[in-house]
């Protein structure tokens, strides 16, 4: 950093430390913490709300309030991810894999402490890299073309083996489901509509928010409702010492923090590689490189939380590089930020790196200071937040589910979001019961659209010569090794995760998991046949995906039907959870479990049904009070106090602050004057 850059950095710091601008930074940070903790909302919604208020502000104040919000949404999203297994934003999905098991084990304080500290350090590293790299990274970012972006996305699929928890073939099959779902909507090559089933909702494909909430939130809430027990049995380790243990864990794994922050910042600087990918890449890197990770990741390893959280906060610093240097937004949030720049007469590009370098460094300081403030606030409240894990399930489930219902509507503000959430909620619950890993499906969905888009651009721009580019060949080679190695190990019976077990041939038998595999193969076969109706360009990816899906699940089916798993001494047959759909419930028969599951589904569907009649927000109030009173067996007094209290909070935040336009209800259409006076109908 030369003297001119140092002078600009000091000048920017002096501007940010102006009391009025510090107040704006604090307000933005507080708002970012709030929207990050609400599933389905996130920084994009918050920034949309802030944008009109930046008119008339001086550039430093506007930057302070906007970057304060954006910098910390992936700090507070750790709260629902750890406590409920619900992703606050798409950037915290990987945090669930180890954070939620830690909470169930009574270590929520430790997980939250580690998550907040890793987020702060990751954000600071991202800010430092942004400060030093703005002039340096310009030629590097310009050299990355669509073939390299395609190769990076394909490489992301090699993480499926890591995210499969020992069930590699099932993980590859789940990834194929995600890739197939990603092909719904408008094909980028032929503009042909695929899998829309005559509904306008699917024309632009499925949104990520209801899909991810369905895959992760609904199954965990369903299990809580079925088991009727608290998340954690006790909070013996959710004390101040537990939180400090989490902080110590971060510093004990400081090199992991640095590596994952570099991954987050580096991938964040590449336009199109969004938050929904970065945390999975960092998590996969940690699972491959950390000692003993293959045995512990996914079951409550604090290093999994650290890897995910340090990467998703670092990405904001990286995403600012193309936004500042080229005026090319690195993410959807950056696109809104770029709009604010233009409205504030802040021209991105060469001027931001020369004559207005102080404005660029004000972005750096805002990100750094907001991360410190946000993490500090969260750490102060971590121990109180941890106590949520022992709240009675009859109170906790309706509160969290109501937040999910209100949050999921923010995806595309259509009734179809609820159908998507319920469909993938059912699929996710069945996958969990039959031992299918769910993260590969979400990863496949996220990468599927990017892969198809970048492939189309690459072929149109370079023909098929793009395959011969040396960075592409190297990345493809690494991908092939990453995918095939664990598959070959499973086929040869050399799975490193269970070295003390072996598989042997037995007489054929049909287990519940085998029947589920047959169902998935049938679905793949149907879509393979239906894809024949599309033009060649539009049918290529769906047929490849379904073909490989049939291959992977077919191999899994053969193993389920003709092989059993036992210890190497042959004395004890391993009773895997995939053959017992009640594996996570003590003393529950299959019939009782299914009965409770149907009741939970009925309560969830009732919100949508009642919402059609009287409006979504009034339906949430009815649901909150009735669930706690009739299902949770709470008193009317407690049910009304809690239900009305949370409902008023939703009304204030979503109706008055975020100005959400609620879907039309039957009563609102019948009595227009009612909707004109009360928009919630």
Image (tube, rainbow, N blue to C red):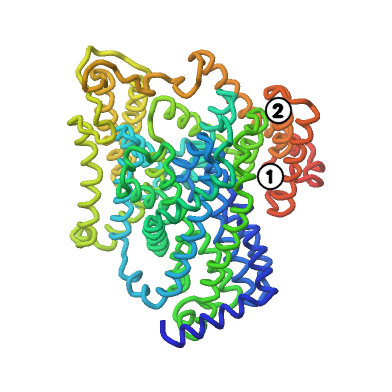
- Residue 207 on image: x %, y %: 50, 45
**Residue located 56% across and 69% down the image:** 366
- Per the rendering, the mark at residue 628 is 2
SS class, disc 1: loop
User: In this rendering, would 310 be left or right of 524?
Assistant: right
Query: Who is closer to the viewer here, 60 or 29?
Result: 29
Q: Residue at x 76, y 43 (%)?
A: 648
* 353 vs 326, nearest the viewer: 353
Which secondary structure lies at badge 2? helix
Q: Is the C terminus in the top left, top right, bottom left or bottom right quadrant? A: top right
Q: Read off the residue under disc 1.
A: 662
Q: Residue at x 25, y 36 (%)?
A: 496
Q: Where in the figure is residue 191, as x and y percent of width and height?
A: 39, 50
Give the image location of residue 177, x and y in percent.
Answer: 37, 36
**Which callout, 1 or 2, points at the residue further toward the start of the chain?**
2
Q: Tell me the mark number nearer the camera, choosing from 1 and 2.
A: 2
């Amino acid at each position: 950093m030369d003297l001119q850059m140092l002078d600009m950095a000091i000048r920017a710091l002096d501007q940010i430390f102006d009391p009025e601008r510090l107040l704006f930074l604090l307000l933005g940070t507080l708002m970012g913490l709030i929207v990050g903790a609400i599933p389905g909302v996130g920084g994009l919604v918050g920034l949309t709300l802030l944008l009109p208020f930046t008119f008339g502000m001086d550039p430093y104040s506007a930057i302070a309030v906007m970057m304060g919000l954006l910098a910390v949404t992936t700090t507070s999203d750790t709260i629902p991810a750890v406590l409920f297994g619900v992703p606050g934003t798409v950037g915290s999905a990987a945090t669930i894999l180890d954070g939620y098991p830690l909470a169930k084990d009574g270590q929520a304080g430790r997980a939250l402490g580690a998550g907040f500290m890793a987020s702060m350090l990751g954000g600071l590293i991202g800010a430092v890299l942004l400060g030093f790299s703005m002039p340096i990274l310009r030629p590097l970012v310009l050299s990355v073309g669509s073939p390299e972006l395609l190769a990076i996305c394909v490489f992301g699929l090699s993480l499926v083996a890591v995210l499969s928890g020992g069930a590699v073939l099932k993980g590859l099959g789940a990834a194929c489901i995600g890739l197939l779902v990603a092909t719904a909507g408008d094909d980028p090559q032929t503009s042909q509509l695929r899998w829309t089933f005559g509904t306008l909702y699917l024309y632009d494909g499925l949104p990520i928010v209801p899909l991810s909430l369905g895959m992760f939130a609904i199954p965990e809430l369903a299990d809580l409702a079925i088991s009727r027990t608290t998340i954690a049995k006790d909070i013996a380790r959710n004390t101040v010492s537990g939180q400090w243990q989490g902080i110590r864990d971060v510093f004990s794994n400081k090199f992991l923090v640095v590596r994952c922050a570099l991954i987050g910042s580096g991938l964040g600087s590449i336009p199109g590689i969004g938050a929904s990918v970065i945390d999975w890449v960092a998590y996969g890197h940690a699972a491959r490189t950390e000692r003993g990770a293959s045995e512990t990741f996914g079951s409550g390893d604090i290093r999994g939380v650290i890897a995910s959280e340090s990467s998703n906060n670092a990405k904001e610093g990286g995403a600012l590089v193309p936004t500042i240097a080229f005026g090319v937004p690195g993410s959807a949030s950056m696109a809104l930020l770029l709009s604010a720049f233009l409205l504030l007469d802040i021209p991105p590009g060469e001027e931001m790196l020369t004559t207005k370098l102080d404005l660029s460094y004000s972005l750096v300081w805002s990100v750094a200071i907001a991360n410190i403030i946000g993490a500090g606030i969260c750490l102060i409240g971590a121990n109180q937040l941890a106590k949520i894990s022992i709240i009675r399930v009859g109170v906790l489930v309706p509160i969290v589910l109501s937040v999910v219902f209100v949050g999921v509507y923010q995806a595309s503000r259509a009734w179809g979001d609820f159908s998507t959430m319920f469909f993938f909620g059912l699929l996710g619950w069945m996958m969990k019961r039959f031992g299918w890993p769910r993260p590969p499906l979400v990863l496949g969905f996220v990468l599927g659209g990017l892969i198809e888009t970048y492939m189309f651009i690459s072929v149109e721009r370079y023909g098929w010569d793009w395959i011969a580019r040396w960075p592409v060949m190297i990345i493809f080679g690494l991908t092939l090794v990453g995918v095939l190695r664990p598959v070959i190990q499973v086929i040869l019976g050399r799975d490193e995760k269970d070295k003390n077990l072996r598989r042997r041939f037995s007489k054929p038998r049909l287990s519940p998991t085998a029947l589920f595999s047959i169902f998935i193969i049938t679905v793949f076969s149907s879509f393979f046949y239906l894809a024949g109706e599309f033009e060649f360009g539009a049918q290529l990816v769906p047929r490849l995906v379904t073909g490989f899906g049939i291959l992977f699940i077919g191999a899994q089916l053969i193993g389920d039907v003709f092989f059993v798993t036992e210890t190497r001494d042959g004395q004890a047959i391993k009773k895997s959870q995939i053959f017992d759909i009640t594996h996570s419930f003590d003393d529950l028969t299959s019939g009782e479990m299914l009965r409770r599951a149907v009741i939970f589904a009925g309560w969830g569907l009732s919100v949508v049904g009642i919402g059609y009649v009287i409006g979504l927000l009034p339906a949430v109030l009815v649901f909150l009070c009735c669930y706690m009173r009739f299902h949770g067996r709470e008193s009317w007094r407690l049910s009304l106090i809690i239900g009305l209290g949370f409902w008023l909070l939703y009304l204030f935040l979503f109706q008055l602050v975020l100005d959400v336009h609620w879907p039309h209800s039957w009563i609102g259409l019948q009595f227009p004057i009612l909707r004109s006076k009360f928009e919630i109908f």
